[in-house]
Amino acid sequence: MLAKIKEKIKIFGPGAIVTASFIGPGTVTTATRAGAGFGFALLWAIIFSIFATIVLQEMVARIGIVTKQGLGENIRDLFDNVILKFAAVWLVMIAVCVGCAAYISGDLLGTSLGVAYLFDIPENYVAPVIGVIILLLGLSGSYKIIEKVMIVLIVLMSFTFITTMFVAGPDLGEVLKGAFIPGIPEGSILMIIALIGTTVVPYNFFIHASTVSEKWDSIEGLKESRWDTIITITVGGIITGAILITAGALIQGQEVTSIVELAAPLEPLMGNLAPFFISIGLFAAGLSSAIASPMGAAVTVSSFMRWEGGFDSTKYKIVFSVVIGLGIVTSALGFEPLEVLLFAQALNGLILPVIAIIIMVVINKKNVMGKHINPIWLNIVGWAVAAVVSFLGIYSLIDALSTFA
């Protein structure tokens, strides 16, 4: 029996990395604020975001396994026109790298927040140490180590955040209503967009397409990859939902800036364990996202440049080191430049529609995918999801540009 369980667990990998990646400080904070501001009313947005992520990531994983290439290589091969190819390659590559570099400082500071809260140590002391640990992890060149670390972090987040949700004792009827009866409370539009936007992440497409070939070397891996994607991303949605539900049950109606504000109302229910649970969950969420940011940049550049060697490539390690190095320096200074973050938001808002449409085009090219192209029903679903995330991306772009103005 134990051997069968171990065999089943072995299928998890690339999907787990994607899941661990999108549950970062941004997602945790957004879910907390959504619960505090609107109770359980926006749970449906999390369900939609998980559905959209599964649809797009499954296609990306299929592209990676069938073509034995990353998403970057497939984007290059899509264009015959040299100018279009050059524009697509450099626009997407620069946008992803700038986004990863812009958010890494926040990821490291978010990771350190849990430790800082628990032990009363300044975040900018803890963050660089975590950055150095991540740098060593990236320089190891081992996909398997990163895969195992991400799975452990998902287990940690599941245990801490789902436990706190049950302890909070939410009203089940209201939870089900928020999950399955979509509503848009007054003033919630930006929060809905944020909940979906922190889940459907552009660089995760590149990570997924490249890591599936590290895990599976033949078409036979498609079924396992599909289950890996569906199960792990669904778990990610449950974790995000648990955070929102806990906040909705305990601090609805309050203005919050961080999930650590859940610790105080949990103390009457959990005693001294409350700060520990919140800190561990926040640390795991931050660390997973902080690992994924430099990996996303390195994988994207490697894929577009057709660098061989995967995670053990010297060029891959250089890109990884540059991004995490920026994070180490900026987090030590406590530096999160608003202008760079807004610029990254604008670029990601611009490329999300482009990548979503490209995924749909590539997945339907019979000369590329053979019999593994989308069936009609999945095309209908896929194009609908692509349309929604494209709208969100454009809205995010306009929002960022209006801030500049």
Image (cartoon, grey):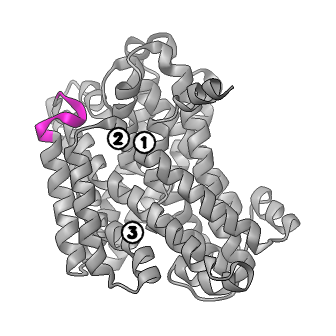
Q: Nearer the viewer, residue 272 or 351?
A: 272
What residue is shown at x 43% (from left), y 52% (from top)?
A: 21
Q: Is residue 341 visible?
A: yes
In this rendering, position of residue 140 left or right of residue 170: left
Q: Amino acid at mark 3?
A: Thr
Rendered position, 146 above or below 252: above
Q: Which mark is residue 111?
A: 3
Residue at screen point 69% across, 72% down: 246
Q: Residues within 10 Å of mark 3 (few under 14, many from 20)?
A: many
Q: What secondary structure characterizes most of the magenta part? A: helix
Q: Secondary structure at mark 3?
A: helix
Q: Is residue 312 magenta?
A: yes
Mark seen at residue 145: 2
Quarter of the figure with residue 397: bottom left
Which residue in the structure is indicated by mark 1? 148
Instruction: Give the mark nearest the N terminus, 2 or 3.
Output: 3
**Frontmost residue, 141 versus 300:** 141
Residue 1 numbered mark, or none: none
Residue 375 placement (x, y as % from top left): 60, 20
Answer with mark 1 or mark 3, whichever residue precedes in sequence: 3
Rendered position, 179 above or below 38:
above
